[in-house]
Image (cartoon, rainbow, N blue to C red):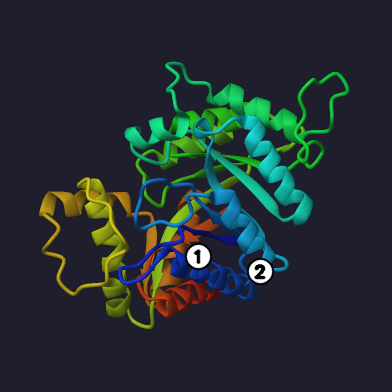
């Protein structure tokens, strides 16, 4: 089974966006050496702790600094953009780095509504996501002689397009269009089982896929001991709790005491981050094995926010070893 990596370019406390982007490239190079198949980046806006807002630019930065790793978006929040612009951006990336670029598409804004309005200038009352996906697929396909508008670069690049989601909506759309599907279970696992069943049961073969292809996203935090992994993971728990409380910030330093997080909020955060493997090498193997046995993904994508960059590199190296052992 292929294993891949989702990076949010975390901006840690005491660091800058420049540091985060340098760390992202370094992580990608380590991921390539460790046997990861894909390296995806996500579009988020107005978040002090995430540096990948200009996602296609960061993808180009990572692709230029690696050799064989597939690099892509996990994802581009398509309602924020004109499909033609995204087709041109990813057509350009695919022209620069042939057969290495992926395009995952999401329907959420990737930010708060005030920022979404700043991005879009106006908000559509109706949901145009399915139509926008089809339009984008058309721009990336072989050139239509009758088309009045073409993506240049873009047409004929056939950049692989994925549908991302955390509900039944994305599962149904991916199945209907015959596209690969990635579920955001690393932060919203509530509907994972039902969404996977829906996608597999209603999938229609297409020019892109003849059978369903499902990618599971899971959190990972590895260290030499369970106790050390729990300590390192406190940064992500704090960051997620602060985000849920309307106080997003840079990725906090780890703490031994999480009493800052109220019990009710801690329960919500633990549930949101429950699709994860945490701990020593043995714990990682056990946790990832359980997820794979339960959901039978075609591919698994791992993600994790750790304040110390060296500790994060070590965590993903341990996770790659666990996947090879499985």
In the image: residue 255, left or right of residue 199: left
Q: Position of residue 181 (x, y in %)?
A: 57, 41
Crowding at dot 1, Cα within 10 Å, few <14 / some 14-19 / many 20+, comes out as many
Q: Is residue 277 above or below residue 183?
A: below
Residue at image position (48%, 76%) is 313
- Quarter of the rendering containing residue 210: top right
Residue at the farthest bottom position: 224
Q: Is residue 122 above or below residue 255?
A: above
Q: Which residue is mark 2?
A: 65
- Quarter of the rendering containing residue 325: bottom right
Q: Which mark is residue 21?
A: 1
Q: Position of residue 12 (x, y in %)?
A: 35, 67
Nearest the camera: 302 or 72? Answer: 72
Q: Which mark is residue 192?
A: none
In the image: residue 11, left or right of residue 175: left
Nearest the camera: 62 or 210? Answer: 62
Residue at the farthest right position: 145
Residue at the farthest top position: 126
**In the rendered picture of this protein, how many numbered marks are placed on residues?**
2
Q: Secondary structure at mark 2?
A: loop
- Whether residue 205 can be seen here: no
Q: Position of residue 17 (x, y in %)?
A: 43, 63
Nearest the camera: 290 or 13? Answer: 13
Q: Is residue 118 above or below residue 102?
A: above
Q: Is residue 140 above or below residue 228?
A: above
- Quarter of the rendering containing residue 134: top right
| Marked residue nearer the N-terminal end (2 or 1) | 1
Q: Quadrant of the C terminus?
A: bottom right
- Whether residue 168 can be seen here: yes
Q: Quadrant of the N terminus?
A: bottom right
Residue at image position (53%, 57%) is 301
């Amino acid at each position: 089974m292929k294993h891949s990596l989702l990076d949010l370019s975390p901006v840690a406390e005491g660091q800058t966006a420049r540091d985060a982007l340098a760390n992202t490239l370094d992580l990608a190079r380590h991921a390539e050496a460790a046997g990861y198949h894909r390296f995806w980046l996500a579009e988020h806006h107005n978040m002090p702790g995430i540096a990948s807002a200009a996602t296609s630019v960061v993808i180009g930065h990572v692709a230029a600094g690696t050799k064989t790793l597939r690099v892509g978006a996990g994802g581009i929040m398509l309602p924020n953009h004109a499909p033609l612009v995204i087709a041109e951006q990813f057509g350009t990336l695919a022209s620069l780095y042939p057969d290495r670029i992926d395009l995952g598409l999401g329907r959420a804004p990737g930010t708060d509504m005030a920022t979404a309005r700043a991005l879009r200038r106006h908000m559509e009352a109706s949901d145009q996501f399915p139509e926008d996906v089809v339009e984008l697929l058309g721009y990336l396909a072989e050139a239509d002689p009758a088309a009045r508008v073409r993506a240049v670069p873009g047409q004929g690049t056939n950049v692989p397009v994925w549908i991302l989601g955390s509900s039944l909506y994305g599962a149904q759309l991916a199945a209907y269009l015959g596209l690969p599907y990635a579920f955001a279970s690393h932060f919203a696992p509530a509907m994972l089982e039902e969404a996977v069943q829906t996608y597999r049961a209603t999938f229609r073969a297409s020019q892109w896929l003849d059978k369903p292809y499902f990618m599971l996203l899971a959190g990972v935090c590895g260290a030499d001991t369970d106790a050390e992994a729990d300590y390192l993971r406190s940064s992500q728990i704090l960051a997620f709790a602060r985000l849920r409380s309307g106080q997003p910030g840079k990725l906090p330093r780890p703490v031994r005491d999480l009493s800052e997080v109220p019990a009710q909020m801690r329960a919500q955060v633990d549930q949101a981050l429950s699709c994860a493997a945490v701990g020593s090498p043995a714990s990682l193997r056990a946790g990832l094995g359980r997820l794979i046995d339960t959901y039978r993904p075609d591919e698994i994508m791992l993600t994790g926010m750790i304040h110390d960059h060296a500790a994060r590199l070590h965590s993903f190296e341990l996770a790659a070893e666990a996947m090879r052992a499985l």
